Image (cartoon, grey):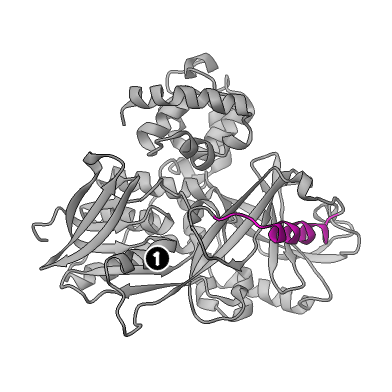
Amino acid sequence: MTDADYDLCVIGGGINGVGIARDAAGRGLSVLLVEAKDIACATSSASSKLIHGGLRYLEFFEFSLVKASLREREILLNAASHVVRPMDFVLPHVPQQRPFWMLRLGLFLYDRLARRDRLHASYVLDLSSAAFGKPLSPSYGRGLCYADCVVDDSRLVVLNAMDASARGAEILTRTKCTLITPHEDCWVLDLEGKDVAQTRRVRASMVVNAAGPWVENILKDSKMLDDRGSVPTIRLVKGSHIIVPRAYEGDQSYLLQQKDGRVVFAIPYEGDYTLIGTTEEDFVGDAYAPMISDAEIEYLCQAFNGFFQKKISRADIAWTYSGVRPLVDSGAKEMRKASRDFRLYEHPQSRAPMISVFGGKLTTYRLLAEKVIDRILHMSNRFAAPWTASAFLPGGDFPGGDFDAFLQYCREEYSWLPPDLLLRYACAYGARMDRFLEGARSLSDLGDSFGAGLYEAEVAYLIRFEFARDVEDILWRRSKLGMAMNEEEIEHFHSKFKDILQDVDP
């Protein structure tokens, strides 16, 4: 396009940024993605772990958002059925809340707003006799069951980054963009890395600012917020979750209506746990380090205890996490009414195209990325056909997209693996698990054991292919094994990690 170093520079390694980089690289653009910390280090690893249409958005008449989300749910289920999986959701009826007819009508629309090939339609439940009603308080006599999907959110981000890299994109983690400057027919970006080699200045013919909670900071630092107020603003909203030991039997999730009009999910998590969330409150502070408050803990415990026979308290909590969602500020007084849709802003400061991304949600990241690349190519008078709607993500390309059949194949191929470990590998890596299992015939062939089923062969794979550069990347984002390891095991892993990193030399 010009004599720039790259056709496109994407700022931000969350789900939107990596999705944009992947789409652009697949359309033949030379792409650089820069992320100040690790891939999926913030909002994109702190979600409620759902790929869903957003049933509650129907209440606010956001039909187009729900319809788009339901379409994307089907696309992602086909593209990565190892990390995106169907799940039943039980909605107990609360007579004092929304009337039953309203819930039934909402689910009728939810079933029909977009085509579904692999998920069942909603149906009415007699909770007094159905197995799904067994964990609930006897006061809940009827409810509804519908289907949505759960996801390992941070792995979904990493898979997109891997695919972008495989298609030629350069992914630089721990590299911060400190300044964007317009220059004739390109943009000049100052990058600051952890070492001298990563601190440099690059030129890009196009720029996409997808920095999530930091999208406005990038613009302020580069003096790109004009006085006319034409640039959208974001509202930072903190969402917190608690994780407790498995609180009920079964693989179903529950949607719990609250007195304040919000809903809270209870979701099976990592086999041995139940995930409960989320809260919503305005946030001010360091978006890299949000913390759950005492009030949020109390709210989530009460939300769960109001529905289930088993009661939980602060003492039962095994882990908590919080994330900051950058919502488009529409002026809504209630946070639950703030839209989860996105807005794209085209910057006029240069002849070279630049777009900033405001808002968005995990489920619609692929659609957002497609619209961004369509638009930025149009701004530069170019065209390349969209392609991601029918493409697999890494590891999702097993025959027929049938995860159960793939799992059975793995049980036969790797019969020496313990069942729980094999299941974790299949769910995390799909068809790519052979990258570190090939040639192995026993656990000893996988190298050092660090506890909780983490072996050296997997660590080396994560460093080589998945941009992992420190212990936290592996224990809390590429996996959640940090929850299962004791302090001694984590300390041992710390002591060995640097040697493995040097041996792999990514």
Position of residue 291 in the picture relative to residue 225 (left or right): right
The answer to which quarter of the image holds residue 417 is top right
Q: Is residue 304 magenta?
A: yes
Q: Look at the picture and state if 25 lies above or below 382.
A: above
Query: For the point 23% across and 67% down, which residue is it?
Result: 377
Please give the range of residues in magenta.
290-308
Residue 62 % position (x, y): 55, 78
Please tell me which residue lies in front, 449 or 389. Answer: 449
Query: Which residue was labeled with disc 1?
Result: 368
The answer to which quarter of the image holds residue 453 is top right
Query: For the point 73% across and 58% down, which residue is it?
Result: 300
The quadrant in which the C terminus is found is top left
Query: For the point 67% across and 39% down, which residue is it?
Result: 271
Position of residue 373 in the picture relative to residue 149 (left or right): left
Residue 223 % position (x, y): 27, 70
Query: For the point 31% across and 41% down, which residue is it?
Result: 194
Q: Amino acid at mark 1?
A: Leu
Q: Is residue 283 magenta?
A: no
Residue 483 % position (x, y): 62, 37
Main SS, magenta residues: helix
The quadrant in which the N terminus is found is bottom left
Please tell me which residue lies in front, 46 or 175. Answer: 175
Q: Look at the picture and state if 426 lies above or below 380.
A: above
Position of residue 285 in the picture relative to residue 209 (left or right): right
Q: Is residue 179 visible?
A: yes
Residue 187 % position (x, y): 18, 63
Please tell me which residue lies in front, 185 or 167. Answer: 185
